[in-house]
Each structure stands twice: as C-alpha cells, then as structure tokens.
Image (tube, rainbow, N blue to C red):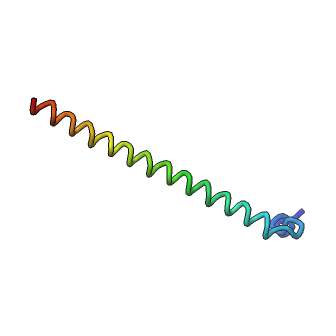
Amino acid sequence: MNWSEFFDMGGYAFYVWTSWGLTALAMCWLFMQAKLRNAKIRSDIKRQMSREALLRNKS
C-alpha cells in the first residue's frame, strides 16, 4: 500500500477526510469555548471578591 492509496481511502476519501476535518474543527471549537468560559468565570469571581472586600472595608 502506498501513500496515494492511503489518502484515496478506496474511493471514499472525500467522506473520510471531511469527517476527520469536521471532527477536528468541532474539537477545537469546544476547547476554545471551554477556555473562554473558564476565563469569564474566573473574571467574574475576582470581580465579586473585590466587591465583597470593598464592602467589608467600608463597614
């Protein structure tokens, strides 16, 4: 078996490589969404902690 046959996938290359590509794209999207969500949650927590510390210092 040579590389040409491997990449041709027995005539199903379009479907196989499209599936691989879409899966990789979806995985990257999910990873980025999780990182952005994590950053937002951390930011919200820091903001809330600052507000609570400010309120405690005023009392």
Residue 22 % position (x, y): 67, 62
Instruction: Name the residue at 54% across, 51% down.
Output: 31
Q: Is residue 36 above or below residue 54?
A: below
Q: Is residue 58 above or below residue 12?
A: above
- Quarter-of-image position of residue 26: bottom right
Instruction: Name the residue at 81% across, 68% down.
Output: 13
Tell which of 9 and 6 is nearer to you.
9
- Quarter-of-image position of residue 24: bottom right
The total number of labels drawn is: 0
Is 3 situated left or right of 23 in this image? right
Is 52 situated left or right of 40 in this image? left
Residue 10 % position (x, y): 89, 66
Quarter of the image that includes the N terminus: bottom right
Tell which of 38 and 57 is nearer to you.
57
Residue 8 % position (x, y): 84, 69
Instruction: Name the residue at 21% across, 34% down.
Output: 52
Is 9 situated left or right of 50 in this image? right
Is 17 situated left or right of 39 in this image? right
Tell which of 7 and 45 is nearer to you.
45
Q: Is residue 40 above or below residue 19?
A: above
Q: Is residue 41 above or below residue 21?
A: above
Residue 35 % position (x, y): 46, 49
Quarter of the image that includes the C terminus: top left
Tell which of 37 and 9 is nearer to you.
37
- Quarter-of-image position of residue 12: bottom right
Instruction: Name the residue at 82% across, 66% down.
Output: 3
